[in-house]
Image (cartoon, rainbow, N blue to C red):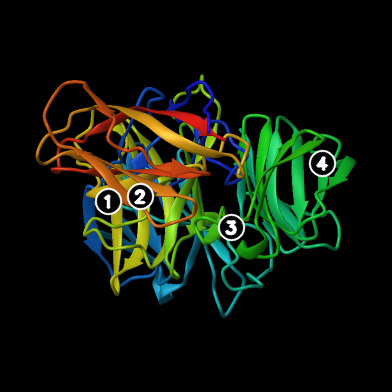
Amino acid sequence: MSSFTKQSINLKNFTWGISQDDFLTTWKQVLYTENLDLNRDSYFVSLGRANTWRFTTTASITWFFKSTDAVFAYTSDGKIYDSNWILKYTFSWNEPILQAWEFNNYIYFLLENTVSASYIHRVTDNSIILDTWIMNAVTITWDWFIREWNTFPIVVLLNENFVIWVWNSVYQITDDDISTEYNIWDWKVVWITRIGWVFKVYTENGVVAFWDWESNSIDSFIEINQTVRWVINDGKIDNIVAGASENQTELILLNWYTTQTLAQLRYSDRLWTNVFQIKANETQEFTKLGNVIYFKNDGESNTDNILSYGTLNPSLSDWFNIPFSIDSNWNVIDTLYSLFGHDSLNGDILYMWINSNSEFAVEKIALSWWTSFSYRQSWYLQTNIIDWWSRIQKKKIEAIKLITSGCDIDNTIELQQSIDWWTFSSIQTINTWAWITDTNIYTKKDTFRDIMFKINFVWDWNTTPKFYELQLIYTNIE
């Protein structure tokens, strides 16, 4: 028996988030993680932010809207609440509020009337600031109903008008309440985005029309070849969730006429579960805050979590992460109904309406570093499978080096390992205080064909341990 020269693998700077494959990966990626902060800093990984505010509800919330710098919720029974959950306004007959948006110093509300055609009301921003809530009907010419439950018309704003769609019709409404209907084609419109005067009109069967609003004509179109579920624009790029359901999820980027599949639902052989099972297919089930898009995602055992794509650091590559999967009481989120990102003057805040532990609640999470917050209770990061491109060649661990900081008796980082597809076992727990802890583990001389590591984080509420780097030193064994 002889051995080769010692080799090493360094796992650090996890700036590409959750990988697409159990084996094919860069060492900047991980197999899986939840409730950790991978978006904020490329130098270390820490526990994620905890939900900072909770209000239990009985009303069915449709979504949220912003007026000046205040956030309000609107419901399916015609009510509007402020961010302290104080009732501010109730529409007559309790009609469902389908959509709310800000335009020309007004907040517009699209309501469904089950007796006559759907209609729009509006209130001035100043009326909301003064807390008078003087609501006025908008007189426009149309005669349509919302033809499907849970279909919320998308609003696309321009400087002098806004655009909404219903079924296969698109309505342009000017600031002096003139409505013009356009029937582009017979297919159902599911989303509209725009760049300048070019509108990209998405249909349910994956055809995208490039509609020039000045000439009122389609100058070109492309095919996504997938069922389009929702779209969000980020600069000149559209992020498209496609697939007939979350069981066929694809995230596709459209840059003018060029498409690229960024992620697909995949089954992880080592996690025994699906990853990237995006469930968002309605307006209120996704949001954008800064450079990060947040999706409603399918979690474990019929629960929901939040999958994010992007980074709070715009100089880094975008990546996937699961920043939130539990509520403020540390219960898993059974159902996530609404997400709303608020770029507040006092810091970025993420609002969500959820059901957890048989209770409906609104919660918010402060994301900016200068705002008051606490940390998640505990969670883990799981590395990809390390086999150094050979599952036949046997290897022996010579040493493991771990760099951490902020550990003490209440803030710990535990290193576990899984060898050759076996259960995880504990190697060492770092719980001694030091500003930077350089831990050399020489006692483990296990042999392996492939190995995974799990880094467990434990907190004491207002501080978090940090993980910087893991180095595996090994030799190949003949």
State the separation of the CA atoms marked 2 and 4.
Answer: 34 Å
Amino acid residing under circle 1: Ser
Q: Nearer the viewer, mark 1 or mark 2?
A: 2
Q: What label sits on residue 83 in the rendered view? A: 1
Disc on the earlier residue, 2 or 4: 4
Q: Residue 321: x percent and y percent? A: 46, 42
Asked if residue 147 lies left or right of residue 45, the reply is right
Which class describes the residues within 10 Å of circle 3: few (<14), some (14-19), or many (20+)? few
State the separation of the CA atoms marked 3 and 1.
Answer: 30 Å
Per the image, label 2 sits on a secondary structure element best described as strand
Q: What label sits on residue 283 in the rendered view? A: none
State the separation of the CA atoms marked 3 and 4.
Answer: 27 Å
Disc on the earlier residue, 4 or 1: 1
Disc on the earlier residue, 1 or 2: 1
Q: Residue 413: x percent and y percent? A: 24, 39
Which class describes the residues within 10 Å of circle 4: few (<14), some (14-19), or many (20+)? many
Q: What label sits on residue 211 in the rendered view? A: 4
Q: Residue 267: x percent and y percent? A: 60, 58
Amino acid residing under circle 3: Thr
- Contact flag, marks 3 and 1 (Cβ < 8 Å): no
In the rendered image, which residue does mark 2 sit on? 351
Residue at screen point 33% across, 70% down: 59
Per the image, label 3 sits on a secondary structure element best described as loop
Residue at screen point 67% across, 39% down: 238
